[in-house]
Amino acid sequence: MQFTKMHGIGNDYVYVDCFTQTVSDPAALAPLISDRHRGVGADGLILICPSKIADVRMRMFNADGSEAQMCGNGIRCLAKYAYEHSLGRKSGPFSVPGGNTFPVSLRVETGRGILTLGLQIDNNNKVEKICVNMAQPILVPAKIPVVLKGDDVINAPIDIQGRQMLMTCVSMGNPHAVFFVDDLSAIELEKLGPAIENHKLFPERINAHFVRVDSAGEFTMVTWERGSGATLACGTGACACCVAAVLTNRCARAVKANLPGGILELNWSEADNCVYMTGPATEVFTGNWPD
């Protein structure tokens, strides 16, 4: 089986072109191929599939084999691969409300629904930057899901390992809990991450993010991803942090997110209530996995 290793600011995945190949059991393959000692090494497995309702379809599996609805960094890499390998249909242009216009667009079927991406193409016909319309954030607890009553989960208390913390929860097609802190270096991610991910309030587990606000237009974050652990970046998580920062009056709607692996540009648009995420995608290498 041929594969391609790609990453979006360090959030790395193994991609398989299912236009020409078949993966019979991706849930079983994901932990094997993602293993950083005995496999290719990745945060998960992403299948690039034909779609009857969009240009291309994305199926994403975490490193533990669980299937996730969405991956913000992963979908940018998928768009780069699809364009540069002429998979699916392309159209254009794509415009961000009040912002940039991208010459080429791609519609991707995901567990979140159909998402539209704008592609910036360089002089060598390579994709150098991608903007994703990540759709509208979901704030209703039952739809995130979080086992709490009310219309939203903003600055809600949660007990973690004997300490009370305040969280704001957002779904971007997958669930996120955001914690604002003054000192990121004091966060014991390997201890707090699993405790939050598997807390009884989250019936489908959750992605945990710790955020330090640097200014009204910038924040820095670290992430514990559901099913993958600590990662260098989380695109849906960065979008959730942007929404949480606005909801708690900490940041403007257009912000720069500093993640361990790089920078994402985010904009929670007032015009359509959608979150727009812009960032790079990088191909690392290709190879063959034994069947």
Image (spheres, helix red, strand yellow):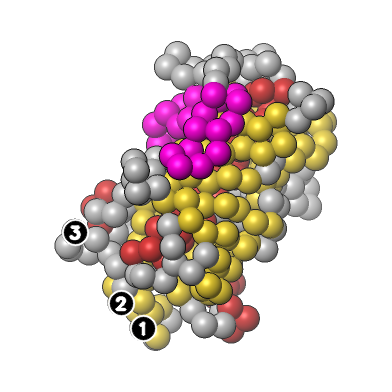
Quadrant housing residue 88:
top right
The CA distance from mark 3 to mark 1 is: 22 Å
- Does label 2 or label 3 sit earlier along the sequence? 3
Q: Secondary structure at mark 2?
A: strand
Which amino acid lies under the numbered mark 1 shown in the image of this protein? Answer: Gln
Q: For this rendering, which residue is in front, 47 or 136?
A: 136
Which amino acid lies under the numbered mark 2 shown in the image of this protein? Answer: Pro
In the image: residue 137, left or right of residue 233: left
Mark number for residue 214?
A: none
Q: Is residue 60 visible?
A: no
Q: Quadrant of the N terminus?
A: top right
Residue 34 lies in magenta, yes or no?
no
Residue on which the image places disc 3: 151
Q: Secondary structure at mark 1?
A: strand
Which residue does the image show at 31% across and 49% down from the upper left? 138
Q: Which residues are magenta?
A: 93-117
Which residue does the image show at 56% across and 83% down from the upper left? 183
Residue 100 lies in magenta, yes or no?
yes
The CA distance from mark 2 to mark 3 is: 15 Å
- Does label 3 or label 1 sit earlier along the sequence? 3
Which amino acid lies under the numbered mark 3 shown in the image of this protein? Answer: Asp
In the picture shown, does residue 182 fall above or below 257? below
| Residue 5 picture location, percent across and down | 75, 38
| Residue 109 picture location, percent across and down | 46, 27
Overall secondary structure of the magenta section = strand
Outermost residue toward the left in this view: 150
